[in-house]
Amino acid sequence: MNIRVSDPAAIEVRDLTVAYRDKPVLWDIDLTVPSGVLMAVVGPNGAGKTTFVKALLDLLKISAGRIRFFGSPYEACRQDIAYVPQRGSVDWDFPTSVLDVVMMGRYGQLGWIRRPGRRERERAREALRRVGMEDFAHRQIRQLSGGQQQRVFLARALVQDARIYLMDEPLQGVDAVTERAIIDLLRELRERGRTLLVVHHDLQTVTEYFDHVMLLNVRRIASGPVDEAFTPDNLRLAYGGRIAFLRSADAAGPSDAIAP
Amino acid sequence: MEQLFSDYTLRMVALGSAVLGIVSGGLGTYAVLRGQSLLGDAISHAALPGIAIAFLLTGGKTPLALMIGAALAGWLATLWIMSVTGTTRIKYDSMLALTLSVFFGIGLVLLTYIRQRAGAAQAGLDTFLFGQASSLVRRDVVTMAVPGGAALLLMALFWKELKLLAFDPEFGRTLGLPMRRVDLFLTALLVVAIVIGLQTVGVVLMSAMIVAPAAAGRQWTDTLWKMVLLSAGFGAAAGVTGAVLSSTGTGLPTGPLIVLCMGVIMVLSLLFAPNRGLAARHLRARRSTGRFQLETVLLDLYALGMQHNDPLRPHPRGAVQAMRAKEVPVDRLLDRLEKDGLVRRAASGWALTDAGLRNVETLKEERT
């Protein structure tokens, strides 16, 4: 018999529980993210989306559970994982330039004390070109608009040259043109075999932008390919039936409206 | 009296104060950027019991011993603040206030005890409250310059790690950099910067030397290394001016004078720095209001003209004024536009010129 051992999943989460004081923020989450997918994480406010991403990155203490990336624990493959935090998590009035921020993505590989040099600058410029911000390299970061800030963070993750990208609301507060550009970039990364886990807030665009989805509300409500997991029933479970969600006519499945 | 302050004394005073200003200004930059301005206050107040205990243990006023005592106490206070806020629900600012006053209280009690026990002759420790620059001798300056210089050197070496800590520590952790340790390291540098200033400026006002130079420096630049250099320069300037003023016979304590000098630099920076200064902002706001009003008058003339399907048709001044509130100085605006060649006087009032019409067309594009 020919037993084929399949490659380990890009991200494998088992029984993940995170509690703040006595209150569980994430409860007993199992999730498998296959390699090379573009997965959205959606759920209502306070569902624990950001907490989930931070737990994956070992940025906060987990109460229980096991997390593996390509079969290894986080510490063993840190270099393979890039992080795009929420735009509002830093002070954009900080006295530094766009190019400097993007080069920070290389600090991990540079090692202690060593300064970023010409090679780092070139990689940062290249990343800025890919997000359409090459003309802004020497701009002060406080002069950027929201969409530009978001693209600078994306460029900083690009120079990490990772296999897995964890992104917290990269489309939050960006205009329609920037949103398209970012989505094209995410798809390009997927075409190159990268795995992307993206916290997303706009239910209307999930089917259009993503191929996989996880519905989260403290517990994992559902996960998998969008056409299997992103169903009205699951949405009702995740959002508690409080939303009116209109599926666009061209989306797969029957047209549904969930109303309270 | 003048012989008392020989060149040697003045030179030492100026040198010591310059060292203190450079180090506290340079390292204060990070404290200010990280929103930790008050940590400096807690550290400097917490240093007082350390100074007193070092005095009691060594029985003398050796600068190095006192400085080590101050540094240990300041460092201990910081660790205490960090661990309590990390493990309990007490907020950071409450913890700062609490630590500052408790340590300072212990320091005052110990000072009183020393004064009673050792008599008036040993009351020299009181100068640590408000600082005394005129007592600086070569040994003091060396004791300040060596650790201060080392702290600045370390800051330069770990420049990128410290920058990452100040800008985005969580991202730094995902890169595998031990940001907690970097944080402790930076705090240690800050403790050094504070401790070397205590003899000159005093524990009560030392935090101003951490915060004010950096806050003033921030006004003038958007580049981190320029900000560090500027605040070091501001710190040195204020230190030297204040210390020299204090030791040339005014009899005033040095700390308050240095801080006053720093205050002057700070206020000037707040008011007159290009870009961020209040004056520059005010001018910019006025200029843009002015331009907006001019553009509005142009658009009004155009709109009036279009009612007759002739954008270049003249209209009396009253018609233009009627489009806007009485406060809008239509006469002055029309004169200004005429000077720019955008409108012209006609027999029956004011009309757009061809250049004015072109201007209107680009404006209409911009505003839609």
Image: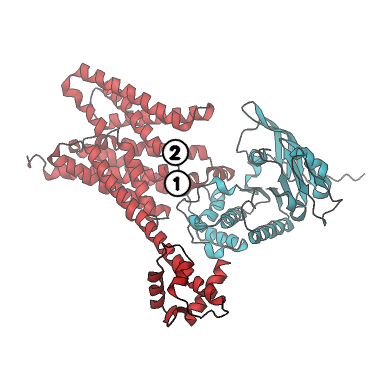
Chain colours: A cyan, B red
Whether residues under marks 2 and 1 lie with C-beta atoms below 8 angstroms apart, the answer is yes
- Dot 1: element: loop
**Residue depicted at x 40% and y 31%:** B75
Residue B59 left/right relative to A216: left
Q: Quadrant of residue B273?
A: bottom left
- Dot 2: element: helix
Q: Where is residue A142? Give x, y as percent.
A: 49, 55
Tag 2 and tag 1 share a subunit: yes
Q: Nearer the viewer, residue A75 or A173?
A: A173
Is any part of residue B121 visible from this angle? yes
Inspect the image, locate mark 1, and give the three-letter code of the amino acid beneath it: Phe
Q: Residues within 10 Å of mark 2 (few under 14, many from 20)?
A: some
In the image, residue B246 sits, relative to residue B301, either above or below, namely above
Residue B330 left/right relative to A169: left
Residue B303 badge: none
In the image, residue B262 sits, relative to residue B126, either above or below, namely below
Q: Which residue is mark 1?
A: B158
In the image, residue B334 sits, relative to residue A236, either above or below, namely below
Q: Which residue is mark 2?
A: B185
Q: Nearer the viewer, residue B45 or A87?
A: A87
Q: Where is residue B367? Give x, y as percent.
A: 55, 67
Q: Chain of mark 1?
A: B
**Residue depicted at x 52% and y 48%:** A111
**Residue depicted at x 55% and y 57%:** A145
Distance of mark 2 from mark 1, alpha carbons?
A: 10 Å
Residue A186 left/right relative to B125: right
**Which quarter of the image is occupied by the C terminus of chain B?**
bottom right
Inspect the image, locate mark 2, and give the three-letter code of the amino acid beneath it: Phe
Q: Quadrant of residue A28?
A: top right
**Which quarter of the image is occupied by the N terminus of chain B?**
top left
Q: Chain of mark 2?
A: B
